[in-house]
Image: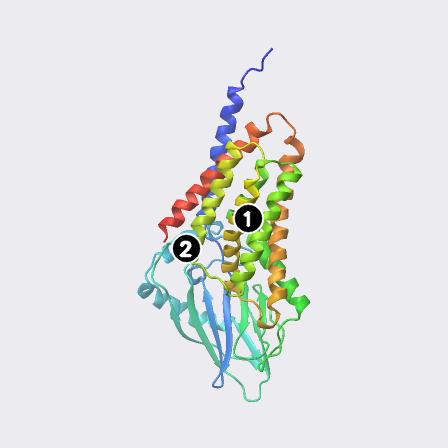
Amino acid sequence: MGRTFDWTGLKLRLVAIMSSLWVFIGMATAHEVTPTIGDLRVTGGLVQLELRLNIEAFLAGIDLDGLENTDEDDQSARYDALRALGSAELSPRVRKYAVDWADQITITAGNPLSLSYEGARIPVVGNVDLPRASFLLLEAPLPTGAQSLTVTWPKGAGALVLRQHDVTDPYTGYLQGGETSPNIPLGGGASLGAWDSLVSYIPVGFTHIIPKGLDHILFVLGLFFLSARLRPLVWQITAFTLAHTVTLAMGAAGWISINPAIVEPLIAASIVFVALENIFVRKLHPWRPVVIFGFGLLHGLGFASVLGEFGLPQGQFLPALIGFNVGVELGQLAVIAVAFLTVGIWFRNKYWYRGRIAIPASVVIAMIGLFWFVERIGAI
């Protein structure tokens, strides 16, 4: 007797697919929390701290500690309204806020210094779906004879990448809200060692995949859903890893540079391609790893642009780069592990696995990738 078609089950699966689609699209348009970049200089007897930050999140009163995107906060509506303001309208609010907020940043050189607000640069309104990076300049007189200082980043301010400039072997560190930097010699020499640099950049790479790299997560899942068997997956992951390692290294070294406005739509297109191929192709063909290698080159450029925002320690470029790449790989392996544990281990040998799981999942991934592609093309 032939099998009867389960129309009820099909309807339920379609509802689940569409629900997943809207959930992921919501995540796609969410406002990702980015770390503040702090550039520290000592010049003319002054300590200068220039901050590149998402000032609207601070003005909205959002607690950024441990937050992944601002849509999760109760103040998200106020935050969105501030993002739509022009620089002329936003500047007075920034000044009023920064004058008081500067007191919450503690720089100590023997005694706490008194930071003053010296001005801001606020870009014009662009794509309101993307964070706007503004710049604040804070200054304080340096006590005579001071040889070193520490920086304490305020609670609720999220993460800070602190970078020392204009000295030999400058300090580069990563502080969470409420943390204090180690003692930073004003003459330089506080750069991390090779092992410390490698270890400190592993979480930076990992968090770029989980939870912040939804586009990379979907690409890796696209590789998984062609076949949940180990051999095809290993071939694809190997090609992808080799490729993105090459362009990540070249981009981080400054040997190649491509505008992210070009790279990001192409990354979205790569997600669409892989997902559609899953739908129409049943097995790993010789061309698939070659195509994946090409897409890996694109994703590596995306990784390099992110790493460029953080900066790499000048004296420990290679260890920090390796640490970041290790973090990326651990993130990708975690995605694959979760996919295996939730889907592959239980259902990959079922006759209905491809029709009821792999293809519907690939349809969702393709639609999200297409949504991103259109959105990113529109932002150019």
Q: Is residue 249 above or below residue 103?
A: above
At label 2, counting other C-alpha atoms closer than 10 Å, the crowd grade (few under 14, some 14-19, many 20 or more) is few
Residue type, numbered disc 1:
Phe
Q: Is residue 24 above or below residue 6?
A: below
Of discs 2 and 1, which sits in the foreground? 1
- Where does residue 167 sit, x and y in percent of width and height? 55, 80
Check the image and name the residue furthest to the top.
1
Q: Disc 2 marks which residue?
A: 261
Left or right: 213, with 228 as reference point: left
Q: Position of residue 66 (x, y in %)?
A: 56, 56
Q: Considering the image in quadrants, where does the N terminus appear?
A: top right
Q: Residue at x 62, y 48 (%)?
A: 238
Q: Which residue is mark 1?
A: 293
Of all residues, the one furthest to the front in this rendering is 286
Please report the residue visible at 62 percent of the width from the left and 73 percent of the height from the top. 191
Sort mark 1 into few (<14), some (14-19) or many (20+) by Cα contacts within 10 Å: many
Residue 195: x %, y % from top left: 68, 66
Residue 68 visible to the viewer: no
The answer to whether residue 247 of the structure is visible from this angle is yes
Instruction: Identify which residue, 238 or 302, lies in the foreground.
Output: 238
Gap in angstroms between the C-alphas marked 2 and 1: 21 Å
The way the protein has been coloured in the rendering is rainbow
